[in-house]
Image: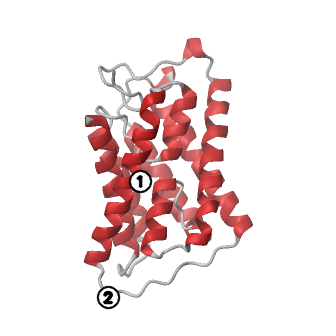
């Protein structure tokens, strides 16, 4: 149960930061910095408990990588979605009365943008947090947070920069994105996670890949 609570908390603060940074915050350049930093600190906070996925696409990628118990996948995703949903309630409370206009996206560019940077995110997660060559490092949280920050700067105006089905749920509930666009995030995020995990496994043979050598390694579910 502890790991599910950790997933809930981490996803909650990620989506809370997204909502409060984007809605009624004025200076838009602050949002990607805040979002990347929030993800980074929550990863460092919860990595030793749950692996700090905070993202159903990451959970899928780590499952294919073989570093999460199959029985934990559904509870993880439920915790992540619940954290995102509750965060939207908090954002609406803090930003009561602020007018929100859903962003207009073009399907093709949005699909590609979400696919590319979700691929980058899952690829970085797997390489920074599960590969033998980076075993025992202390930079994995920074690398992952910076990947999301980079993606938000690069394609946030194209797709909304979710890279995460739980975030996609959150921005849909907040009215930042139309519900009719939700499928774009689900298709792009999950397909990118699958491709990233398959490629990781191809270029990191099993004999050369081990989880980070700690008692409760990040991105591997503690047993």
Tell me if mark 1 has few (under 14), some (14-19) or many (20+) residues whose alpha carbon lies within 10 angstroms of its own: many
Mark yes or no: residue 37 visible.
no
Front residue of 70 and 195: 70
Question: Which residue appears at 62% of the width and 30% of the height?
Answer: 200
The residue that mark 2 highlights is 97
Of circles 2 and 1, which is in front? 1
Which quadrant holds the C terminus? top left
Dividing the picture into quadrants, the one containing residue 30 is bottom left
Q: Residue 111's spot in the image, x, y percent?
A: 68, 60
Residue visible at 46% across and 59% down?
167
Number of the label disc, if any, that sits on residue 22 = none
Label 1 residue SS: helix
Q: Position of residue 182 (x, y in %)?
A: 58, 64
Return the x and y of residue 59 as percentages of the image width and height.
Answer: 49, 39
Horizontal side, residue 180 vs residue 212: left or right: right
| Crowding at mark 2 (Cα within 10 Å: few <14, some 14-19, many 20+) | few
Q: In percent of the image, x 37 and y 51: which residue is there?
A: 39
In the rendered image, is residue 182 in sight?
yes
Q: Is residue 101 above or below residue 170?
A: below
Among the two numbered marks 2 and 1 on one chain, the one whose residue lies closer to the N terminus: 1
Image coordinates of residue 207 in percent, x first then y, are 57, 11
The part of the image, by quadrant, that contains residue 21 is: bottom left
Q: Residue furthest top?
A: 207
Q: CA distance from mark 2 to mark 1?
A: 25 Å
Label 2: which secondary element = loop
Against 93, is 117 above or below? above
Q: How many marks?
A: 2
Q: Which residue is mark 1?
A: 81
- Left or right of 143? Residue 16 is left
């Amino acid at each position: 149960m502890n790991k599910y609570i950790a997933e809930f908390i981490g996803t909650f603060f990620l989506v809370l930061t997204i909502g409060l940074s984007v809605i009624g915050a004025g200076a838009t350049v602050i949002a990607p910095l805040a979002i990347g930093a929030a993800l980074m600190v929550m990863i460092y906070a919860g990595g030793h408990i749950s692996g700090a996925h905070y993202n159903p696409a990451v959970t899928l990628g780590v499952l294919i990588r073989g570093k999460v118990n199959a029985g934990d996948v559904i509870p993880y995703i439920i915790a992540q979605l619940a954290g995102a949903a509750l965060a939207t309630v908090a954002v609406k409370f803090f930003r009561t009365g602020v007018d929100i206009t859903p962003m207009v996206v073009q399907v093709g560019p949005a699909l590609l943008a979400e696919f590319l940077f979700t691929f980058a995110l899952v690829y970085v997660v797997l390489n920074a947090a599960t590969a033998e060559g980076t075993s025992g490092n202390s930079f994995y949280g920074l690398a992952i947070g910076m990947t999301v920050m980079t993606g938000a700067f690069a394609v946030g105006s194209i797709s909304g920069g979710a890279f995460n089905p739980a975030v996609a749920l959150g921005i849909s509930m907040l009215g930042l994105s139309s519900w009719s666009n939700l499928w774009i995030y689900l298709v792009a995020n999950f397909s990118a996670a699958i491709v990233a995990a398959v490629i990781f496994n191809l270029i990191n043979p099993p004999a050369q890949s081990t989880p980070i050598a700690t008692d409760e390694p990040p991105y591997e579910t503690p047993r």
